[in-house]
Amino acid sequence: MAEGPEVKKPSSRLATVAGWALILCWGLVRFWSNQLAWLLGAPCLRRAYHLWLAAVVMFGPLLQFYVNPRAIFANHHNFFNIKFVRSAWGWTCIFLGGFILLVVYLASRRPLLTVRHLSRLAVGAGLWLGATETFLLIENLTGYCFDAIPEGILVNNLTDKRTCLRMGHRWHGYDVSGHTFLLTFCCLLMVEETSVFRRYLAQGCPAGIPLRLIFLLNVFLLGLWNFLLACTVVYLYEYSHKVVGAAIATLCWYLTYRVWYRYSWSPGKPGAGLFLKTMPGEAKKRN
């Protein structure tokens, strides 16, 4: 008597489904990383993005008349402000540093060149720390200490913000928005650094799942910084404080990526020393 068709075991079915799911996920990662790499690598779109940032900072505060003042983002101590904005540079270094490490090393196999490119993050950290101290100095030089209760009495013998706050008083000065500076600076750096992925793919360099995933994570983080920047300029700080903070961030980006990094004795521009100067058939080599 002939035997009937063999019944597949549940474990083999699960393995088949898992295999197709992995293929689908890999296809989505490859598709979106290719599309976003092309988008971020287009010079005209990067210029448009700079205009977008300027428009958000300059015209975003006008929306404060149309939003709910009791929204969560209107509170300095909201979850996003504490967990992300205040540590934005740390998050940026983790994700962007991993991306730069993989791109430079896989494209060149040269550890010293990899360290040189990573040093741009060290320069960025120095600029951020320097800007933070400068903003505090400006606030100290332009401010004064006072008691909020009962009638705003001046406390003339305390001329330092930290001492004033430690004594339980309040300080009023010109507070350049450090959050606006940091978020703007991180956005400009991430767009500049991730733009090389388009040329990386065009050269046919190794582009496995880990590299593509960390690229997509950087794009997600860039979107998050844009969202939090919009919330900051709408809900928090005075108008001039936000504009000045964003202007200083843009100046720091310009002096490094558009001026200093063009010289041979600098950390170099993103992609320097990694790719061929001429890339015939660039579109055909894209992965």
Image (cartoon, rainbow, N blue to C red):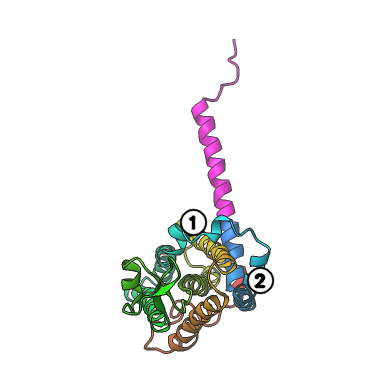
Image quarter for residue 89?
A: bottom left
Residue toward you, 3 or 254: 254
Which residue is farthest front? 150
> Label 2 sits on what residue type?
Leu
The Cα–Cα distance between marks 2 and 1, rounded to whole angstroms, is 22 Å
Residue segment shown in magenta: 1-29
Image quarter for residue 106?
A: bottom left
As drawn, is 241 to the left or to the right of 69?
left
As drawn, is 165 to the left or to the right of 46?
left
Q: Which quadrant of the rendered structure holds the N terminus?
A: top right
Residue 18 seen in this snapshot: yes
Up/down of 264 relative to 3, above or below: below
> Label 1 sits on what residue type?
Asn
Percent of width and height locating residue 3: 58, 15
Disc marking residue 62? 2
Which residue is farthest right? 66
Percent of width and height locating residue 111: 32, 72
Q: Residue at x 58, y 63 (%)?
A: 34
Disc marking residue 51? none
Residue bearing the label numbered 1: 78
